[in-house]
Amino acid sequence: MVAVGHAISPKAENSGVISKMIRVMMLAPFLLILSGYLNRKMITSNLSQSKPTIVIPWFAIIFIIIAYINSFHLLPQILVQSIITLDTILLSMAMAALGLTTHISAIRQAGIKPLVMAMCLFGWLTTSGLFINSSMQSIFQ
């Protein structure tokens, strides 16, 4: 989305970055909702006798902390730019590694549940991103 926006104009690129960040920010609420749903499902099926806990992934917590730090410009701009460059390199390497190690047989073996969850996450991120973008557009225009 960001690459396509960059090809069109700087304004479109900025919109792409904002849309991407909104989608990433919506992961934390989705994970909380999913955790609550799974805990409730475990309680109703009597699979767990212990007190249910909501599990929040560490990366979601770190993301929120880093966003907070960056929002208040607590780091020097040169350090932020270096981190962004390193992030781009590492993300490219991770995406290439995922593509090189993924086999259709592994997807078939995992079954339908991970694909359904991915589709639910895609739907959640798309609809919430659309709602937030539409809301912000109507406010600022």
Image (spheres, rainbow, N blue to C red):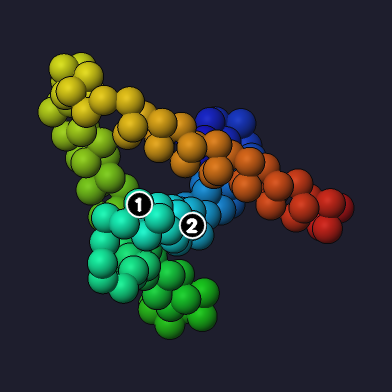
Residue 113 appearing in the image: yes
Give the image location of residue 87, x and y in percent.
29, 53
Residue pointed to by mark 2: 33
User: Looking at the image, which residue is at 25% across and 36% down?
Assistant: 95
Query: Picture coordinates of residue 43 (x, y %)?
Result: 37, 60
Residue 17 visible in the snapshot: no
Is residue 123 rendered to the left or right of residue 131? left
**Residue tagged by mark 1?**
45
Choose mark 2 or mark 1, whichever is in front. 1
Q: Residue at x 26, y 25 (%)?
A: 111
Give the camera-side residue of 5 and 36. 36
Q: Is residue 60 above or below residue 101?
A: below
Give the residue type that dot 2 points to: Ile
Assess disc 1: are there few (<14), some (14-19) or many (≥20) residues with their C-alpha within 10 Å of its C-alpha.
few
Residue 16: where, in percent of width, then height? 57, 43
| Front-lying residue, 87 or 106 | 106
- Contact (CB < 8 A) between labels 2 and 1? no
In this rendering, position of residue 115 left or right of residue 110: right
Secondary structure at numbered mark 1: loop
Q: Note whether 22 is above or below 57 in the view shown.
A: above
- Residue 23 in the image: above or below residue 61: above
